[in-house]
Image (spheres, rainbow, N blue to C red):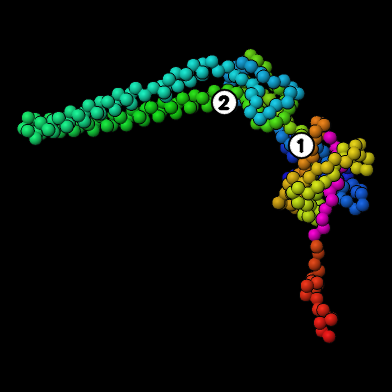
Amino acid sequence: MRHGKHSVLAGCCVCLGAIWVIAAEAPGTEGVPTYVGITRPSGDVSMSFTLAGRVRKVLVKPGQEVQPGQELVQLDDTVERLEMERLKAQAEDTVRVKAAEAQLAQKKSDLKKLEDAFKRGASTEQEVEHAQLDVVIAELSVQLAAFEHKQDQAKYEQAKAQIERMRLISPITGVVEKLSIDAGEVADPQKECIRLVNIDPLWIDAPVPREKAVSLKPGQAVEVEFGRGANPSTQAVPGKVLHVAAEADAASETLLIRLELPNPEKRPAGEHVTVHLAQVEAPRIRSGAVTPSATTNPAKEK
């Protein structure tokens, strides 16, 4: 984490990716520590294709809500689907395996007849040896046919996976924040096609002084007011601590905490908020102090 030297709200300014989060202790209520922060989406996904291709369909538009698994954009996969159908036919075809198995059965039958004839003196040892070799070759042919059949099945699965790569599927519940491509354009794997954000719930990432952050626990309740410092603009909204960093920043002596805030009203992210942290102070034991359980009972001494 790198800390800038900007003086914003008399606090510290932290850069998380492309999002600036500000944490500044402000006058609290009845001793409750209060900080100022900026809301951010709890989900933020930028998507692009992993291969180039012409866009056939764009199935969403900016501002539209999407669900996990929903198809967003399709590339033209006509040629790939034809190849997939060809490979599917090969993967389902077992004629070569059955033919090799039938040939093996015939070779084994021929060998048995020659062995019986050899016992009667009606065939030579050389003929039997040739028949035995034919059986070995036929067994290898069956193995080869089975191996090639598995390869055909693998190629078919690979073709299906290739077609899946020609679709963009939403991994989250969210809203289409940005759409940078249209039908007929050629998708560039190096460029973003679509960006999805989830603003319900919202997140607030803020660095908090170490001595105050250590007593915070995941799930602990907080109150958040939209607005700055002593002049919040709305009624307090309940939230919770989602995560407390395991490593403190040595330079600022802060721990990064993440708060989660329900947002059914779909307020846009990037709004200033005032966070009230109701902490539970950890017990302090002074050096040489005697615990209550170890205190002598005067009544018993008498």
When asked about the image quadrant of residue 24, the answer is: top right
Q: Nearer the viewer, mark 2 or mark 1?
A: 1
Q: Is residue 6 left or right of residue 62?
A: right
Image coords of residue 301 (percent x, y): 82, 84
Residue located at (85% from left, 44% from top)? 223
**Which residue is the site of mark 1?**
201
Q: Which of 35 and 126 is in front in this view?
A: 126
Q: Circle 2 sits in a helix, a strand or a loop, which is it?
A: loop
Q: What stretch is highlighted in magenta?
A: 271-282
Q: Nearer the viewer, residue 236 or 212?
A: 236
Relative to 285, say whether 35 is above or below. above
Image coords of residue 263 (percent x, y): 80, 35
Quarter the C terminus occupies: bottom right
Q: Residue furthest top?
A: 184
Report if residue 274 lies within the magenta region: yes
Q: Circle 1 sits in a helix, a strand or a loop, which is it?
A: strand
When asked about the image quadrant of residue 237, the answer is: top right
**Which residue is the site of mark 2?**
165
Quarter the N terminus occupies: top right
Residue located at (28% from left, 32% from top)? 140
What amino acid is found at the position of numbered circle 1 in the picture?
Answer: Pro
The Cα–Cα distance between marks 2 and 1, rounded to whole angstroms, is 30 Å
